[in-house]
């Protein structure tokens, strides 16, 4: 169970990172 929890957190963190990159790119353009 803890493994799935960690996996979900990693996926969420990765999604947040991608969203941040997109926002930075949008500001640049």
Image (cartoon, rainbow, N blue to C red):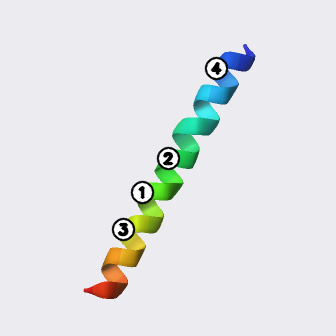
Whole-number angstrom distance, CA of label 3 to CA of label 4: 27 Å
Using the image, tell me which numbered label, if any, was put on residue 4. 4
Residue drawn at (36%, 68%) of the image = 22
- Asked whether the beta carbons under mark 2 and mark 1 sit within 8 Å of each other, the answer is yes
Image side of residue 26 versus residue 6, left or right: left
For residue 3, what is the image quadrant? Answer: top right
Mark sitting earlier along the chain (3/2): 2
Q: Helix, strand, or loop for circle 3?
A: helix
Residue 29, percent from left and from top: 25, 86
Mark sitting earlier along the chain (1/4): 4
The residue singled out by tag 1 in the image is 18
Image side of residue 24 versus residue 1, left or right: left
Please say if 29 is above or below 12: below
Residue drawn at (40%, 66%) of the image = 21
Using the image, tell me which numbered label, if any, was put on residue 14. 2
Residue 8, percent from left and from top: 60, 32
């Amino acid at each position: 169970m803890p493994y799935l929890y960690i996996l979900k957190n990693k996926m969420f963190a990765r999604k947040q990172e991608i969203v941040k990159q997109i926002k930075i790119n949008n500001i640049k353009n």
